[in-house]
Image (cartoon, grey):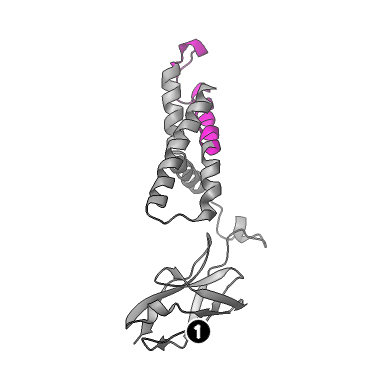
Amino acid sequence: MLVIIAGILGSFVHAATSLADYIGNDNFNKSWTWFYLLRPAIGMALALVFYFVIRGGFLTTSGGAKDINPYGIAALACLVGMFSKQATDKLSEVFTTLFRAAPGEGDEKRKGSLKPDAITITAVTPSSVLAGSLKQVITVTGTNFVQDAKVYLNNAAQTTTFVSATQLTAQIDDALLAAPAILKLKVMVEAGPESPAIDFKVS
């Protein structure tokens, strides 16, 4: 119970700090709500895993439960909870390296790979627009577009219409066309893949 509570406490500190930063910068995305709700549970579970590793003798010599310092265990569990994201990322990196499948095996061999196909942009029509234009609509041609894909200009989402897996249309925000500029255009799926950015000229 001490490990569970300390793991939850550490994860809460991490999640609350992260949430405060994003809200303070007015950059919070509601799609991350589940990340913050599940963070304490993840920290609790990870703290238990580390506790079992220690009690199993991976990091200590033989000894009974009475030989364990409860404050030390609580401190370790709390730290694990606070840095649960970094811990899981590093463990994933370690085990991915150790158990990497040979080329052509694993996900590459399966028909239903979980890795989403990369999004690319092959053309934008028109390729440039005049400054001061209003309600300008562009057509973006590329590959692997999906229903919830959006066109972004300078990291600002534009009103996007899905036409097909190779075509999107977007109405550019008038404020972006107020003056000559080179805008960065990309296609992105929220919490998913995104295309490399290309230059879009406002002349």
Q: Which residues are magenta?
A: 41-69
Name the spot of residue 113 as percent of width and height, x first: 63, 60
Q: Position of residue 125 (x, y in %)?
A: 48, 87
Determine which quarter of the picture holds residue 153. Answer: bottom left
Please identify the residue farthest to the left as the structure is shown: 180
Question: Could you tell me the amino acid type at mark 1?
Answer: Val
- Give the image location of residue 32, x and y in percent: 52, 52
Whether residue 114 can be seen here: yes
Would you identify the image quadrant in which residue 86 lies?
top left
Q: Residues within 10 Å of mark 1 (few under 14, many from 20)?
A: some
What residue is shown at x 47% (from left), y 45% (from top)?
Answer: 89
Q: What is the quadrant of the C terminus in the image?
A: bottom left
Q: Nearer the viewer, residue 66 or 82?
A: 82
x, y (%) of residue 61? 45, 18
Q: Secondary structure at mark 1?
A: strand
Q: Is residue 45 magenta?
A: yes
Q: Is residue 84 magenta?
A: no
- The image quadrant where one finds the N terminus is top right
Q: Quadrant of residue 60?
A: top left
- Dominant SS in magenta: helix
Kindly identify the residue that appears in the image at 54 percent across and 55 percent down: 31
Residue drawn where x is 45% and y is 54% of the image: 28
Tell me what residue is drawn at x 37 percent, y 86 percent: 132
Compared with residue 191, is residue 172 higher up or lower down, i.e. above or below? below
Q: Nearer the viewer, residue 64 or 101?
A: 64
Residue picked out by circle 1: 137
Q: Is residue 13 above or below residue 26?
A: above
Residue lying at the far right in this picture: please name it. Answer: 111
Q: Can residue 105 be seen by looking at this rendering?
A: no
Above or below, 195 against 28 in this view is below
Q: Is residue 183 above or below residue 5?
A: below
Label count reads 1
